[in-house]
Image (spheres, rainbow, N blue to C red):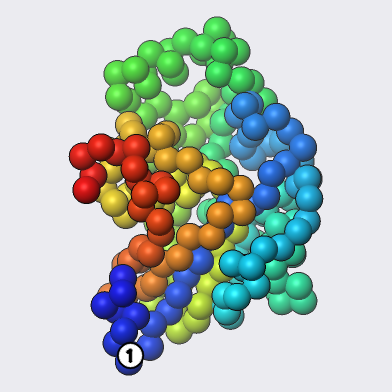
Amino acid sequence: FDQYIKKKEKINKIYFSRHKKTKLNNKIFLGQKLNPNIVEKKNNNEFIKIKFDKCYSSPSLRCRETAKIVTKNKKIITNNLLKEINYGDAEGLNLKELSQKYPEIINSWKKGLDPRFPNGESLKDVNGRLKKFIKNKIIFKNFNYLVFTHNVVLRCLIGSIYKINKKEWYKIDINYFDLLEFISKNGRLISNINRKKYLNIFKNFY
């Protein structure tokens, strides 16, 4: 990352962030159907210091409310490709309830597979629309971007960039209102995230 930043050529920065914490219990599967507010609306220094030209957000209320904290009077562009994973009929359940009602999902995970949630999405589905967003909206464009989205979407982003096995992506946990920095170079994203913070759980990564 640093070698690109030191060069004099134009570098486009892309910042991704997860929304702030909501009023709902974070141990349930919170996807596209439930639409809670965020708990508090305080900004932090990381976001105050960055400069961006355009802001994209998931249409979910929790993302739009978070974006407004940072953007102030700037326009927020909502995009459906940034939505959280669609948990389908599992929306609102906790893990115990999911295992009781849909044991086939748990069994598939144990086998290292990537099942779709009942009437919902898989990681492959989410990663596909994330790649579509990146390709169509922010790659090759001469702007700095700030993007507000969700935990599973960001897991897909980090997991695919670092080529982590998909069955391990659930271990990548993005904190609320974390700021993840990337640059756009030759049609791909180059990461400047804190590796120890997000990737230290993968013992063989380094």
Q: Residue 77: x, y in percent?
A: 65, 67
Q: Residue at x 34, y 17 (%)?
A: 110
Q: Residue 125: x, y in percent?
A: 43, 41
Q: Residues within 10 Å of mark 1 (few under 14, many from 20)?
A: few
Q: Residue 97: x, y in percent?
A: 60, 13
Res 75 quadrant in image: bottom right
Q: Is residue 150 visible?
A: yes
Q: Residue 195: x, y in percent?
A: 36, 53
For the N terminus, the quadrant is bottom left
Q: Residue at x 50, y 26 (%)?
A: 117
- Pick the residue in front: 73 or 179: 179
* Residue denoted by label 1: 9
Q: Residue at x 59, y 58 (%)?
A: 148
Q: Residue at x 30, y 24 (%)?
A: 112
User: Which type of secondary structure does the marked residue at label 1 adopt?
Assistant: loop
Res 71 quadrant in image: bottom right
Res 13 quadrant in image: bottom left
Is residue 42 depicted above or below 105 in this figure? below
Q: Is residue 196 left or right of residue 36?
A: left
In the rendered structure, which amino acid carries the disc numbered 1? Glu
- Pick the residue in front: 153 or 129: 153
- Spot the residue most to the top: 100
Is residue 92 depicted above or below 104 in this figure? below
Is residue 197 depicted above or below 26 in this figure? below
